[in-house]
Image (cartoon, rainbow, N blue to C red):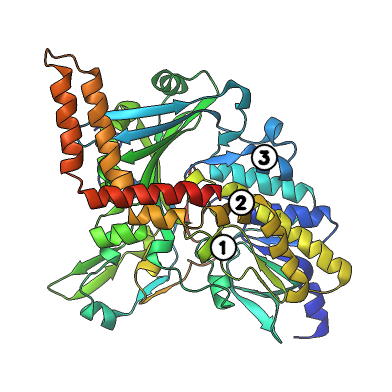
């Protein structure tokens, strides 16, 4: 594959424009995360927002990468999910 | 709040969300002489929007009669192709073109198209408020009376809810249940820059002509998923829509699946030497007729994706959005005529939808999605694979007698697929046909 089309998700997201909100708009219930076996959020998120650190038992939420699709809020019932504040978040220019 | 400030912050109709549904509602209401405020959480209309595809001229014309001459259209769809991928890198393509209906549908970039639509609405008197997130609806005495944004409260006789597939506002009003993963498809796509002449050469198009390519099988085998390629002027859109339930159960990362598709030679050859311009994702409400929420309540109506109005079998959504917006606005105009904003009056919106192609089609396809999902390993995996194997035999001359090859093909066809599976597939096929025709 040509290098002008990156394969890594981080490189794909790098092409996007964001106006980052100073506040996280995705808030999983961390107690539920400890019990959760599937960690579906780490799989279905198209922007790889969620990553789980097994040793620290901690879910990291890189909300600044969010594409605001809502896949995580439907796949997991334990995420307090709202949109970023007015005018904040991702800006699609060619989609 | 004092009477005075309430008057300052009061309009006839508020439309929440400036996508195709919202803008169509807003412009129709403004044409009927009402004061309309169209609010949008993005910094411009289209900034948050992404779709898999095409806009249909019949709907666009109904809302924007001048769109053919003035709107930012990328390419009209001349070729409709269906591609069946196989695991061994081969593929079978069915291509349909009809010279007499070359302007029926077109590809547009939402950041340009949605923006243009809102500009038309503004010209016709709609007040557009970008950078405005509606946090909740204001409900008074069981009637929706306004919106609460980050900074202020704003009132209207009618609020039209067009806040998209996630519709937190329809949820607030309890008009819809929580969506389930099986009711939504996750759409993911990349926009890849290529020169217009390369696009035209690779796809056999003339300038301004475009293709809509739907892709089955291959990496999607066994899932309720479909890939797509669409043509912009100077870029190709490559993406897919896959059931969120299947991605979840099969533990497939969306961007990994996209990479798989892009590696298949059919796709790889088309995008070779291209440059990634944008990557995006969006949910598509594909629950069909059974997932449609309550469409109206006192003082409010729900339209477009927020109302789950999508026909996934025919890739129709933008047209449902625009026409549902228009019908809701017409209902609103009647409500002003009668000075009645209660659900008794607004139920007319549902009647209009039932009489239109929107709910008629969604009723027709009520069970199709269910059946296709249940038999997705057959219809979206096994058979596309077999069709490719058939054409492999059909087109290969290698000095081996054809009879043996076709016999083996037929033997394998039944060996790898138990009789009971074939029986269920046949039943599903009959159900699909009769379900649509009855």
At which x and y percent is residue B377? 28, 50
> Which residue is tagged 2?
B320
At which x and y percent is residue B28? 76, 53
Question: Quick one: SS at disc 2?
Answer: helix
The residue at the point 58 percent across, 74 percent down is B175
The residue at the point 66 percent across, 56 percent down is B324
At which x and y percent is residue B285? 48, 58
Q: Nearer the viewer, residue B319 or B168?
A: B319
The residue at the point 35 percent across, 47 percent down is B426
Q: Chain of mark 2?
A: B
Give me the disc on residue B306: 1
Q: Say yes or no: labels 2 and 3 on the same chain.
A: yes
> Which residue is tagged 3?
B58
Question: Quick one: SS at disc 3?
Answer: helix
Give the distance between the C-alpha atoms of the residues marked 3 and 1, in whole angstroms: 22 Å
Give the distance between the C-alpha atoms of the residues marked 1 and 2, in whole angstroms: 11 Å
Rendering quarter of residue B216:
top left
Sequence order check: which comes first, mark 2 or mark 3?
Answer: 3
Task: Bin the neighbour count of mark 2 within 10 Å (Cα to Cα): few under 14, some 14-19, many 20 and up.
Answer: many
Q: Chain of mark 3?
A: B
- Asked if disc 3 and disc 1 are in contact, CB closer than 8 Å, the reply is no
Left or right for B85, reference B295: left
Q: Quadrant of the N terminus of chain B?
A: bottom right
Sequence order check: which comes first, mark 3 or mark 1?
Answer: 3
Q: Nearer the viewer, residue B22 or B44?
A: B22
Left or right for B86, reference B191: left
Give the distance between the C-alpha atoms of the residues marked 2 and 3, in whole angstroms: 11 Å
The residue at the point 19 percent across, 41 percent down is B414
Q: Chain of mark 1?
A: B
Task: Bin the neighbour count of mark 1 within 10 Å (Cα to Cα): few under 14, some 14-19, many 20 and up.
Answer: many
Q: Say yes or no: labels 1 and 2 on the same chain.
A: yes
């Amino acid at each position: 594959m040509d290098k002008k089309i990156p394969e890594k998700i981080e490189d794909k997201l790098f092409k996007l424009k964001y106006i980052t909100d100073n506040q996280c708009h995705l808030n999983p219930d961390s107690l539920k995360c400890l019990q959760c076996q599937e960690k579906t959020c780490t799989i279905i998120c198209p922007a790889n927002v969620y990553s789980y650190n097994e040793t620290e038992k901690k879910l990291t939420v890189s909300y600044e990468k969010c594409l605001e699709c809502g896949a995580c809020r439907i796949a997991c019932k334990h995420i307090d999910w709202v949109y970023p504040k007015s005018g904040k978040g991702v800006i699609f220019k060619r989609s | 709040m004092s009477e005075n400030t309430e008057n300052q912050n009061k309009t006839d109709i508020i439309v929440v969300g400036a996508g195709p549904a919202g803008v169509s509602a807003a412009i129709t209401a403004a044409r009927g002489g009402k004061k309309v405020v169209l609010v949008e959480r993005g910094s411009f209309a289209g900034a948050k929007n992404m779709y898999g595809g095409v806009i249909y001229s019949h709907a666009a014309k109904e809302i924007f009669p001048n769109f053919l001459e003035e709107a930012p259209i990328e390419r009209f769809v001349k070729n409709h192709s269906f591609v069946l991928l196989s695991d061994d890198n081969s593929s079978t393509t069915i291509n349909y073109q009809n010279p007499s209906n070359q302007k029926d549908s077109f590809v547009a970039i939402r950041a340009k198209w949605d923006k243009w639509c809102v500009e038309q609405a503004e010209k016709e008197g709609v007040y557009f408020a970008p950078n405005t997130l509606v946090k909740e609806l204001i409900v008074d005495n069981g009637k929706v009376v306004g919106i609460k944004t980050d900074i202020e409260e704003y009132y209207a006789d009618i609020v039209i809810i067009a806040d998209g597939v996630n519709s937190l506002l329809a949820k607030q009003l309890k008009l819809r249940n929580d969506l389930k993963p099986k009711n939504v498809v996750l759409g993911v796509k990349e926009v890849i820059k290529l020169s217009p002449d390369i696009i035209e050469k690779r796809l056999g198009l003339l300038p301004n002509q475009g293709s809509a390519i739907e892709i089955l099988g291959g990496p999607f085998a066994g899932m309720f998923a479909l890939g797509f390629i669409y043509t912009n002027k100077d870029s190709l859109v490559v993406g897919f829509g896959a059931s969120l339930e299947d991605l979840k159960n099969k533990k497939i990362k969306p961007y990994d699946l996209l990479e798989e598709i892009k590696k298949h030679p059919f796709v790889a050859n088309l995008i070779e030497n291209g440059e990634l311009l944008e990557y995006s994702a969006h949910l598509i409400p594909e629950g069909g007729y059974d997932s449609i929420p309550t469409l109206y309540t006192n003082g409010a109506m729900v339209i477009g994706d927020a109302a789950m109005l999508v026909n996934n079998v025919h890739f129709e959504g933008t047209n449902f959005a625009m026409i549902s917006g228009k019908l809701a606005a017409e209902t609103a105009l009647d409500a002003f005529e009668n000075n009645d904003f209660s659900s008794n009056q607004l139920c007319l919106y549902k009647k209009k939808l039932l009489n239109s192609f929107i709910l008629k089609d969604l009723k027709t396809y009520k069970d199709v999605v269910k059946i296709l999902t249940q038999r997705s390993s057959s219809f979206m995996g096994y058979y596309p694979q077999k069709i490719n194997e058939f054409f492999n035999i059909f087109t290969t001359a290698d000095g081996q007698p054809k009879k043996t090859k076709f016999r083996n093909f037929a033997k394998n066809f039944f060996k790898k697929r138990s009789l009971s599976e074939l029986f269920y597939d046949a039943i599903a096929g009959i159900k699909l046909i009769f379900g649509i025709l009855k």
